[in-house]
Amino acid sequence: MAILCKYTYDPLDRVSTVTPLAQAVANRFYNGEQLMTELRGDRQRTCIRAGGQLLAQQSREGDEVVTTMIAGDRSNSVLHVSEDGRPVDIAYTPFGHHQAGQTIADLPGFNGEQPDPVTGHYLLGNGYRAYNPVLMRFNSPDSLSPFGKGGLNAYAYCVGDPVNRVDPTGHISIGLTFLSGILFSAVGAGAIGASVGLKESDSGLSTALAAVGSVSLLVGFTGFATTIHKWRGAKFQIKGVEKKYQKKLDTAELARKKLIARYDKKVSRLQTELRRHTDGPENARVFLGNLRNADALLVDGVTFYSDRRLPGIEQFHLDYLFRDTGRGFTAFRVDAQGRLDVRNIRSRTTLSQNTYRIRRSQSDA
């Protein structure tokens, strides 16, 4: 199998070199997590961004400088480019696929990501995982899936909603709605700052950036204010939901404590009756009656609950389990002498039998 392309990574796990078959090596340089410059032989390609928004790209080869103006959407997808007065429009499917003849070589593409020169896939996270816009999924599983923040589907892209979400890291997608106003404001301010820092030889690009920055800043302030208003409203709603559920939790905890207290009271009454009764058949019957009427019985720290409120079919099922399938149970009855007869039974066979007298304890005498 022939190797079509080689990749190397820097200590921060970012793609540092790309070497397609029979082509010169391309060295990549980053500003934080954003690709800024690529050097391939004598050719230098630099992306110009402001506030995270892609505005233009400059290519230098010897003394020749070519500036490509870029217009994109809120997720940074390149939709329109202009190079040497030649405009090109680019359209994508919701998952980022586009016709091969629409793009200009070496430009960023869907969501502002750099397509791979060989496959056309997007190496998200600066090389962490390859996203295939044709298959609409990743080529490899997420290391944070299925039990981490990556979600259950280890290959899914933007949880199936690429219109409203982006995934710059290849791990976790984020929504666009909340960030749009703040991002647009940052684009405006950054574009003006970028235009001031350009050389005089790039005066045309400087003027264009300043114009884009002014318009973006005006619109961005409105978007920023709207975003803050939505954020405050959402925060207020979250507090309301938290109070509502906390109240339900408190109510449930109070009900649980009342139920435990009621069971403890019944068990205590049974224990008192057991100590109070003396010998005789009537006393044994009273004792068994108390057991029969109890909702729960506590024996050495183990609680046994009555099943008399179960539907008939469930009682029949339990009876079948314990009488016919080998489960063990204990049977209580009063014999002719008034003693308490206790038998351990399994599969309708008596394993052991004991009789007891119910006596007054020394402390109650």
Image (spheres, grey):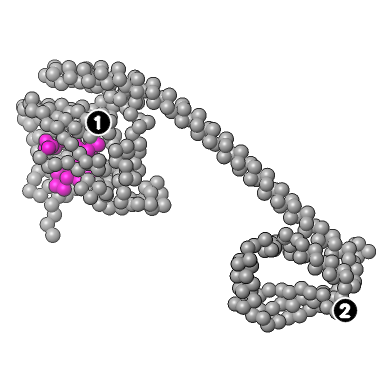
Residue shown at 43%/28% (left/top)? 231
Specify the quadrant that holds the C terminus: bottom right
Residue shown at 12%/42% (left/top)? 100
Instruction: Identify the mark at residue 337; answer none if there is no mark.
Output: 2
Image vertical order of residue 363 relative to residue 178, above or below: below
In the rendered image, which quarter is residue 183 located in?
A: top left
Range of magenta residues = 102-123
Q: Foreground: 193 or 199?
A: 193
Q: Which residue is mark 1?
A: 73
Which is in the foreground here, disc 2 or disc 1?
2
User: Is residue 197 highlighted in magenta?
Assistant: no
Specify the quadrant that holds the N terminus: bottom left
Q: In the figure, is residue 264 to the left or right of 357?
A: left
Secondary structure under tag 2 reads: loop
Place of residue 353 in the rendered image (x, y in percent of width and height, measured from the top left): 76, 80
Place of residue 327 in the rendered image (x, y in percent of width and height, measured from the top left): 63, 75
